[in-house]
């Protein structure tokens, strides 16, 4: 369930993303940042969608569905930005 989603995994991924971004600036930073945002939102979308379809707990299913909708919107926004600003 979502409560058991490993926070350490999230922290490790965030640390790796920060490491990658620290040495960049300008358009290289923008492109790498947007790439990380799209990737992380896709991962989160997959996690919440899976939980929404696999749980037997109606409250958890509702929460996962609501969060998945929000993450989906954020993913679309990140992909739109990436298409216009992050790619050359």
Image: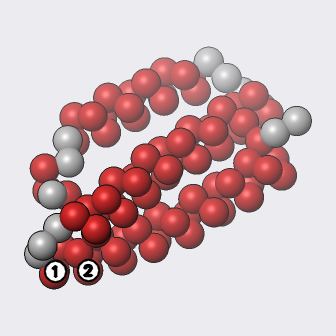
- Residue 76 position by quadrant: bottom right
Q: Secondary structure at mark 1?
A: helix
50 in relation to 30, above or below: below
Front position in the image: 64 or 11: 64
Q: Quadrant of residue 7?
A: top left
Secondary element at image label 2: helix
How many angstroms separate mark 2 from mark 1 (CA)? 5 Å
Q: Is residue 51 left or right of residue 44?
A: left
Q: Position of residue 77 (x, y in %)?
A: 65, 62
Q: Residue furthest top?
A: 23
Vertical relation: 21 (above or below) 81: above
Q: Quadrant of residue 81?
A: bottom right
Residue contact between numbered discs 2 and 1, judged by CB atoms under 8 Å = yes
Q: Residues within 10 Å of mark 2 (few under 14, many from 20)?
A: some
Foreground of the two, 57 or 75:
57
Q: Is residue 60 left or right of residue 26?
A: left
Q: Give the color scheme: rainbow, by chain, secondary structure or one colour.
A: secondary structure
The label shown at residue 59 is 1
Q: Position of residue 32 (x, y in %)?
A: 66, 32
Residue at 27%, 34% (x, y): give it. Answer: 9
Write the residue at 56% across / 69% down.
Answer: 73
Provide residue 35's location: percent of width, then percent of height.
63, 39
| Left or right of 5, for residue 44 | right
| Mark count | 2
Q: Dot 1, crowdedness within 10 Å: few (<14), some or many (≥20)?
A: few
Q: Which mark is residue 62?
A: 2
Nearer to us in this view, 14 or 38: 38
Query: x, y (%) of residue 34?
Result: 65, 43
Location of the N terminus by quadrant is bottom left
The circle drawn on residue 32 is none
Query: Which residue: 43% across, 57% down?
Result: 45
Image quarter where the C terminus lies is top right
């Amino acid at each position: 369930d979502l409560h058991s989603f490993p926070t350490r995994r999230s922290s490790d991924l965030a640390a790796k993303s920060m490491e990658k971004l620290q040495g960049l600036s300008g358009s290289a930073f923008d492109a790498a940042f947007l790439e990380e945002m799209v990737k992380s939102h896709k991962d989160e979308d997959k996690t919440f969608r899976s939980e929404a379809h696999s749980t037997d707990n109606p409250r958890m299913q509702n929460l996962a569905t609501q969060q998945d909708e929000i993450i989906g919107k954020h993913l679309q926004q990140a992909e739109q930005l990436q298409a216009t600003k992050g790619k050359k």
